[in-house]
């Protein structure tokens, strides 16, 4: 698999204007109406996808395998949050990123993220085998 098109330093971005559905109170990660950590993490992953997906071989995509991020500042409803992911290493099928999220005022989170490149057809076949095995286990057959 040729990942030579994924260069160190390549950046991707993702943005969201915080709305009620993005808040901790709405997603179940708290009670305050500020950007929820799971939503920030989703934004970080979207930025990583933006950095690399277009450069993958046909029939391949990346899946997140590791996140080590802090969420250090709150963003209220109406704030614009921008996540940036920068490729810092390509190791075999793994791509490592440094990530940062910021709102209109300051940095709200940062850390590292790793994604692995998979062949979509092979991956979906493995998932189907697992789903079939789970159905058999649940039905008691």
Image (cartoon, rainbow, N blue to C red):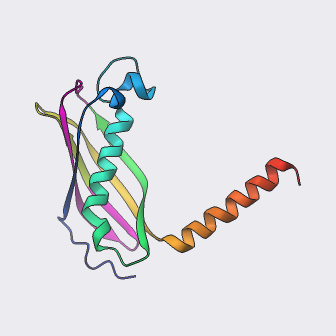
Residue 130, quarter of the rendered image? bottom right
Q: Position of residue 53 (x, y in %)?
A: 32, 66
Quadrant containing the C terminus is bottom right
Residue 85, quarter of the rendered image? bottom left
In front: 90, or 54?
54
Residue 37, quarter of the rendered image? top left
102 up-or-down from 49: above or below: above
95 up-or-down from 66: above or below: below
Q: Residue at x 37, y 25 (%)?
A: 24
Q: Position of residue 110 (x, y in %)?
A: 25, 42
In front: 100, or 104?
104
Task: Name the side, left or right, on which 37 lies relative to 119.
Answer: left
Q: Residue at x 43, y 29 (%)?
A: 27
Residue at far left of view: 105
Residue at far bottom of view: 2
Residue 124 shown in magenta: no
Residue at far right of view: 141
Q: Residue at x 13, y 33 (%)?
A: 106
Q: Residue at x 30, y 47 (%)?
A: 44
Residue 73 shown in magenta: yes
Quadrant containing the N terminus is bottom left
| Number of marks | 0
Task: Name the side, left or right, on which 134 lies relative to 94.
Answer: right
Q: Position of residue 9 (x, y in %)?
A: 17, 64
90 up-or-down from 101: above or below: below
Q: Position of residue 81 (x, y in %)?
A: 20, 38
* Magenta-tinted stretch: 72-97
Q: Main secondary structure of the magenta part?
A: strand
């Amino acid at each position: 698999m040729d990942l030579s098109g994924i260069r160190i330093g390549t950046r991707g971005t993702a943005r969201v204007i915080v709305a009620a559905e993005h808040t901790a109170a709405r997603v179940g990660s708290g009670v305050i109406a500020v950007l929820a950590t799971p939503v920030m993490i989703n934004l970080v992953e979207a930025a990583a996808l933006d950095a690399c997906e277009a450069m993958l071989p046909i029939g391949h995509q990346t899946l997140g395998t590791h996140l080590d991020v802090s969420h250090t500042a709150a963003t209220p409803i109406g704030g614009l949050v921008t996540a940036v992911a920068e490729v810092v290493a390509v190791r075999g099928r793994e791509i490592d990123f440094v990530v940062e999220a910021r709102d209109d005022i300051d940095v709200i989170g940062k850390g590292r993220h790793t994604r692995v490149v998979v062949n979509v057809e092979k991956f979906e076949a493995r998932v189907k085998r697992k789903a079939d095995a789970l159905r058999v286990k649940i039905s008691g057959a």
